[in-house]
Amino acid sequence: MFSKLTEKDSAKSQIKLDPKRIPQHIAIIMDGNGRWAQKRHLPRTAGHKAALTTVKEVTKAASNLGVKVLTLYTFSTENWKRPRAEVDFLMNLVSSAFDIFMPDLIANNIRVRAMGELAALPPKTLAAVERAIADTQKNTGMILNFALNYGGRDEIVSATKRIAEMVAQKKISVAEIDDQLIEKNLMTSTLKSQANPDLLIRTSGEKRLSNFLLWQIAYSEFVFSDVLWPDYSPNELKANIYEFQNRSRRFGGLKKE
């Protein structure tokens, strides 16, 4: 079994990507940490800790390939339902991860951003996030965008409330509400032309969106990898991008001859 996995990974490392068709924005649902740990008879927290190495390696690989935005689904609005001990561990892990990653992020010219209901994060976690954003704000390379305490429905509801308030204050009319106005009020608006992912990847074999970027993925290509997130690698990323490059994106129209 080990030799087959090694052979398969080696084949993926030989994949040649078209540099002109690298997805500008990749979003990843990082799934499978708990199952990775369970397979090794370890606590779930061991899977979350192992996942940090994957985040670091995949981030650098994406940047080197020419990806402009990498959005990672780090903690959802529903994840608060998990056991308190696991939630506390995750919040502390996020805090320490930013400090650990900072030298590599700066060395690779990567900018950190975060979206979600950030004010509801524990003070220590929020401070670490804000520090990472501030320390990398002058970087001009790939944006590493963390979705923290984020939910797609929550995002749309919040945008709707802001727009409704604008109408109530007579700043705009109902007739002025369109796709562009809604997009300006979403959490991804600061990403401008790269707000909508070209490619959405979910690891671990699960095939659902889990309330992630529900508006933005209207025309994204989906790739579902069977690899558990702690085992995900830069070569797997290349393979997923290769699959993306072999698809035809028509955005509701017809392919040009």
Image: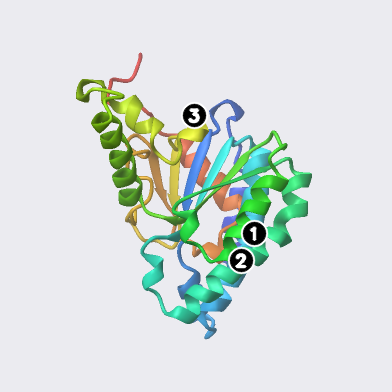
On the image, the x and y values in percent for residue 192 come to 49, 29
Q: Earlier in the sequence, mark 3 or mark 1?
A: 1
* Image: 167 above or below 158: above
Q: Are marks 1 and 2 in contact (CB under 8 Å)?
A: yes
SS assignment at label 1: helix
- Residue at (52, 75) in percent of width and height: 88
Q: Earlier in the sequence, mark 2 or mark 3?
A: 2
Distance (Cα) linking label 2 and label 3 = 29 Å
Q: Which residue is mark 1?
A: 128
Query: Which of the 4 quarters of the picture holds residue 238?
Result: top right
**Nearer to us in this view, 52 or 91:** 91
In this view of the protein, can residue 30 be seen by the observer?
A: no
Outermost residue to the left: 175
SS assignment at label 2: helix
- Residue at (29, 36) in percent of width and height: 165
Using a 10 Å C-alpha cutoff, classify the residue at mark 3 as few (fewer than 14 neighbours), some (14 to 19) or many (20 or more).
few
Distance (Cα) linking label 3 and label 1 = 25 Å
* Image: 151 above or below 62: below
* Type of amino acid at the residue the image marks with label 1: Ala
Mark number, residue 192: 3
SS assignment at label 3: helix
Query: Which of the 4 quarters of the picture holds residue 98?
Result: bottom right
**Total residue callouts:** 3
Distance (Cα) linking label 1 and label 2 = 6 Å
Please name the colour scheme applied to the rendered image: rainbow
Picture quarter with the N terminus:
bottom right
On the image, the x and y values in percent for residue 151 come to 37, 53
Q: Which residue is mark 2?
A: 124
* Type of amino acid at the residue the image marks with label 3: Lys
